[in-house]
Image: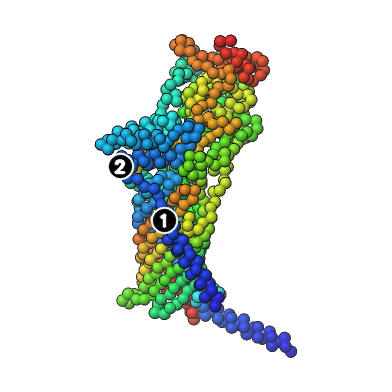
Amino acid sequence: MKTPKILAAVLLCLCAAAAGAQTTERPVLSAYTFEAGSSHIAETYLSPLKYSGWDIALGYERLQAMKFSPERWVMQLQGRLDLQRASNPAKNARMWNVALDLRWGMAHRWKLGNGWSVYGGGSTGIDVGAFYNPRNSNNPVAAKAAWTINALGAVAWNTHLGKLPVCARYQSELPLTGIFFSPAYGELYYEIYLGNHKNLVRGAWPGNYFGLNNLLSLDLRFGRTTMRLGYRCNILSTKASHIVTRRVEHAAVVGIVCEWLSLGPKNNSAHDAKIINALY
Amino acid sequence: MKFKAIYKNIAAAATAAAISASLGGCHSIETWENDLYGNFDALWTIIDQHYCFFGSKDIDWKETGERYRATIDPEWKEKDLFFHCAAMLDELKDGHTNLISWFNVSYYRNWWSDYPQNFNLRLIQEHYLDFNYYSGNGIIYKILEDRNVGYMHYSSFAASFGEAFVDEMLYSMRETDGLIIDVRDNGGGDMTNVERLVSHFLDKRICAGYICHKTGPGHNDFSEPYAYYYDPAENHVRWLKPVIVLTNRSTFSAANNFVSVMKLLPHVAVVGDVTGGGSGMPFSSELPCGWSVRFSGSPVYDPEMHLTEHGVDPTPGGKIDMDPEQEANGIDTILEFAIDVLNRAAEDKNPPSETRLTRHMPHD
């Protein structure tokens, strides 16, 4: 006689869980941004001089509350394609830099009240690209590649500007460890092409791979779409085999933020569901 | 409680990172003023930290720098500094070292100007090729019908030839006694073209040489030499009949490397003058005033670990200069010597070995 009772209990639990799942929806927040500003770059493999110029980038950000604990945990996916062109101090040589940065992270969210939230967590990602100095003969390119594990922190404030809902956010990321590519001090890529792949991968820590990605954004929520305005300051400074690479960007950010909710033929719960947004 | 522990760990990691960052921060980069002394110091430092032949050339760069710095006149104009810096670079005696400004490119020429040129392209085109030859991407070639020898001149390894072009050239010469590869006045170019051309003369994988690089700014900071290999050209025409490579002092850089590899093949002999050298792979940098500088940064060694910066000697018995009197009569004595050796080697059915070259020296 015990078996039917246990089965009934299990069914009740499953139904309760199903009922609970029905009441929670986790919209995806997708931001598409364009960034433009100034760049200050140095790559001593190519030149001992510091170059200055412009920077443009396309960015994508996806934020969503995590399924296992939507009130407390959020995930973030970021992608950024960056192009920089800078001139030497004499203005007679150019250096180009192209970089692709992809990161995935998770952060805990603490709701502090009055619209304030604090996020703390970690992320991991890859940053690949190259510096190109067309004036150089046998060393015109310095390739870059890194995989890092980063500390991630943010603070957000949801408030109103008049009647307009807005969300101000500051986010920062700091690589803690990982690996990155670097040739030796005077090693030509031709030697790498010939097959010498020794010591090309270095361990990263903030002493030899210091980065700080800062984003200050203001999301203006006009009805169904949201406009994002912001300022980005990214700093990267690496040193390996006496080669110093430095990349500093200051850029204005403008973009569109959309919120998406998946609805399928079997999913009619959105009308009465509790909406848990990762940011707003 | 779990979240608190995670938060504490994250906070601790972030704090440690922040401390590390504040200690390391952005890494320092040496800077110089954009004035006479700043630019001179930048040039001296770049060469001091990156140039790769101080040891093998026995140059006291510190003394050289002090000597030249002491004679800078603060009233000098831009051009005065340029020629002063160029004179300092000339002390390296390196054809790969240039100072490049908007008004001039410095160039150490004595590695070839102190020697006979030993090459006259017009003479060959007129008296041996009858102005009627195949050409493509830096290579001209023709079968010297009355001598039964194939001849090709490759003017620059910067010119990338087509594999089909080389296949056709070698196949067309298959009935000749041998092939003459003339790389006189070939100032070098792309090392990958060296590999592509050499691969047509291989029947097995060979060690083509060694390369190393600087691992730090010290004069003796070098990596272990790295052996690199060339493979036979698969699915292409390969030439294993006798070959003579013609050289002069203007055979430089990648062409110098080509000669050093070919010389070790059993069916190849080198005839002419000692090559010009240039075995340091060039590296580039720049000064605050915008001038750029190029210099030897990575030494390349031949397959026997000899440094060929000062040139590759011809095969013993193969050292020969052009006779100016014969040249006036339309005769290239280096080319004539090579043709004669190939013809005789074909008669004997042997490659142009060292003893054969010696036996056929004109004075014998």
Q: Nearer the viewer, residue B72 or B186?
A: B72
Q: Is residue B296 above or below residue A250?
A: above
Q: Which residue lies furthest to the right in this view?
A: A1
Residue B189 seen anywhere in this rendered image of the structure: no
Which quadrant would the N terminus of chain A be assigned to in this image? bottom right
Q: Give x and y (percent) for residue B50.
A: 45, 40
Q: Mark 2 lies on which chain?
A: B
Is A70 displayed left or right of B80 in the figure? right
Location of residue B112 (image quadrant): top left
Q: Do the residues labelled 2 and 1 touch (CB within 8 Å)?
A: no
* Secondary structure at numbered mark 1: loop
Q: In this view, does A5 lie to the left or right of A169?
A: right
The chain under label 1 reads B
* Residue B239, quarter of the rendered image: top right
Quadrant for the C terminus of chain A in the image: bottom left
Amino acid at dot 1: Cys
Residue with the mark numbered 1: B26
Q: What element carries label 2?
A: loop
- Total marks placed: 2
Q: Distance between the residues labelled 2 and 1?
A: 26 Å
Residue at the (54%, 23%) spot, across then down: B313
- Residue beneath the point at 45% across and 45% down: A45
